[in-house]
């Protein structure tokens, strides 16, 4: 059972690190305005996943941490990751990564908008080049997928912890 717990914790850690990396890259690519709240929340959920995985790894060696502490932490983390995956999926729902129109009109993908005045006309400038936004679209989809994978790894970690606790008694 220790091997299963170790594998689930390793997957949880790996997927959460990927979520933080992709989300931070999306945040860094924001050119105009503030980073979308979905991206900030994704970074938070990935960091929470990393914390839960590290505490879970420590709990493999310290029996007093294994049990209710890890169950609650993993439960909260799994709910946060599930919510994050859903939020990103909803934000990019129906977006065709090959459609210039879809990319420019999606606030999560278009790198933000800014107002510009040119003479008597006011312009709203959104986005950057199409290839950059296409890359952001693929990244956002991957971010959502990895949040769902991290969610499943959290659930598996809870089951492994519960079964190993029952096995020791």
Image: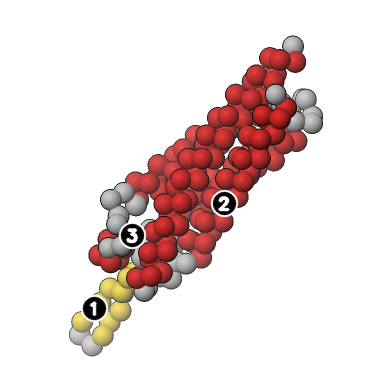
List the single residue furthest toward the left. 120
Q: Neighbour class for label 1 at 10 Å: few (<14), some, many (≥20)?
A: few
**Discs 2, 1 touching: Cβ within 8 Å:** no
Residue for badge 3? 97
Dot in front, 2 or 1: 2
First of labels 1, 3 by sequence position: 3
* Disc 2 crowd, CA 10 A, few/some/many (<14, 14-19, 20+): some
Quadrant in which residue 100 is drawn: bottom left
Q: Earlier in the sequence, mark 2 or mark 3?
A: 2
Q: Which of labels 1 and 3 is toward the front? A: 3
Instruction: Kindly identify which numbered label has been placed on residue 122.
Output: 1
Say which quarter of the image contains residue 99. Answer: bottom left
Q: Residue at left 60%, top 24%?
A: 159
Q: Which mark is residue 18?
A: 2
Give me the C-alpha separation between circle 1 and circle 3: 28 Å
Residue 49, percent across and down?
59, 42
- Which quadrant holds the N terminus? top right
In the rendered view, would you say 90 is above or below 56?
below
């Amino acid at each position: 059972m220790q091997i299963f717990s170790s594998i689930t914790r390793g997957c949880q850690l790996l997927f959460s690190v990927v979520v933080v990396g992709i989300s931070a890259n999306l945040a860094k690519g924001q050119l105009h305005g503030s980073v979308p709240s979905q991206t900030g929340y994704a970074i938070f959920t990935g960091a929470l996943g990393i914390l839960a995985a590290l505490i879970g790894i420590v709990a493999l060696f310290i029996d007093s941490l294994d049990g209710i502490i890890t169950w609650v932490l993993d439960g909260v983390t799994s709910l946060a990751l599930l919510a994050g995956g859903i939020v990103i999926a909803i934000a990019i729902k129906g977006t065709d990564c090959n459609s210039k129109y879809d990319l420019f009109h999606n606030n999560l993908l278009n790198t933000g908008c800014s107002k510009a005045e040119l003479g008597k006309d006011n312009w709203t400038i959104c986005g950057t080049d199409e290839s950059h936004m296409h890359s952001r679209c693929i990244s956002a989809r991957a971010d959502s997928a990895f949040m769902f994978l991290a969610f499943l790894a959290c659930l598996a970690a809870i089951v492994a912890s519960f079964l190993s606790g029952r096995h020791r008694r």
